[in-house]
């Protein structure tokens, strides 16, 4: 029943993801959440580790795109700072938003990965259209109030397993 909420992989952080294995499986695009996935919530502090991870991803052969529900102007500014692209609009977990994102990157369900820290936006939405989904632990506990509600629901769900 809850299979649609289960990620294909889960890790402590993005740094634990085996990117080479994913590339070998045929994945070429990475849609990646911002808040609490690559940066603390609402922060624009970019670590050297993050920069290195992005460069490594691209060296392996991935195209990486920021995909966030945060303010579009902030996300495009971050994308510039990180020298990658961003999906112009959020809208996760809705299917139309994920379809719009795939169209924007010229990707499809077979070659695109969604990485994020939230089951009810990143994972659910990604699973709904058949992307390969990777859940990571949130970087910090300070977050948007709506996210706190989601975490509460995630805990309830975990206890039912
Ligand atoms: Mg997030």
Image (spheres, grey):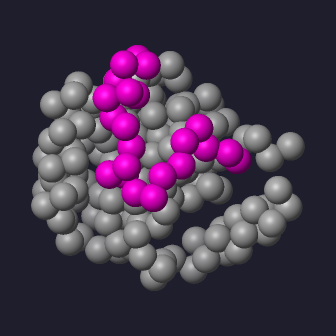
Residue 146 at x, y percent in the picture? 60, 73
Q: Residue at x 28, y 64 (%)?
A: 74
Q: Is residue 39 left or right of residue 137?
A: left
Q: Is 24 located above or below residue 3 in the figure?
A: above
Please tell me whether residue 105 belongs to the stretch shown in magenta: no
Q: How many numbered markers are drawn? A: 0
Can I make out residue 74 in this image? Answer: yes
Left or right: residue 11 compared with residue 104: right
Residue 33 location, x and y as percent? 41, 53
Q: Nearer the viewer, residue 38 or 146?
A: 38
Q: Is residue 24 above or below residue 34?
A: above
- Residue 11 in magenta stretch: yes
The image position of residue 108, as x and y in percent, is: 47, 21
Q: Quadrant of the rendered structure where residue 140 is?
A: bottom left
Percent across and percent down for residue 107 are 41, 23
Question: Quarter-wise, where is residue 56 in the image?
Answer: top left
Image quarter of the C terminus: bottom right
- Asked whether residue 72 appears in the rendered view, the answer is no
Left or right: 154 in relation to 145: right
The N terminus sits in image quarter: top right
* Closer to the camera in the image, 65 or 62: 62
Q: Which residue does the image show at 73% across and 41% down from the upper left?
A: 4
At 62% from the left and 55% from the top, the residue drawn is 119
Q: Residue at x 21, y 45 (%)?
A: 54
Q: In the image, which residues are magenta?
A: 5-26
Residue 42 lies left or right of residue 96; in this view the side is: left
């Amino acid at each position: 029943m809850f299979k649609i909420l289960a990620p294909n992989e889960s890790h402590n952080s993005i740094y634990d993801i085996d990117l080479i294995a994913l590339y070998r499986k045929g994945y070429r695009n990475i849609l990646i959440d911002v808040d609490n996935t690559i940066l603390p919530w609402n922060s624009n502090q970019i670590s050297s580790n993050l920069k290195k991870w992005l460069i490594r991803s691209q060296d392996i052969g991935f195209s990486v795109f920021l995909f966030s529900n945060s303010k579009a102007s902030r996300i495009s500014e971050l994308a510039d700072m990180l020298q990658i692209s961003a999906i112009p609009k959020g809208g996760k977990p809705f299917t139309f938003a994920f379809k719009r994102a795939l169209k924007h990157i010229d990707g499809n369900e077979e070659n695109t990965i969604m990485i994020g820290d939230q089951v009810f936006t990143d994972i659910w939405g990604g699973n709904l259209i058949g992307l390969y989904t990777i859940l990571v632990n949130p970087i910090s506990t300070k977050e948007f109030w709506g996210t706190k509600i989601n975490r509460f629901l995630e805990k309830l769900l975990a206890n039912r397993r």
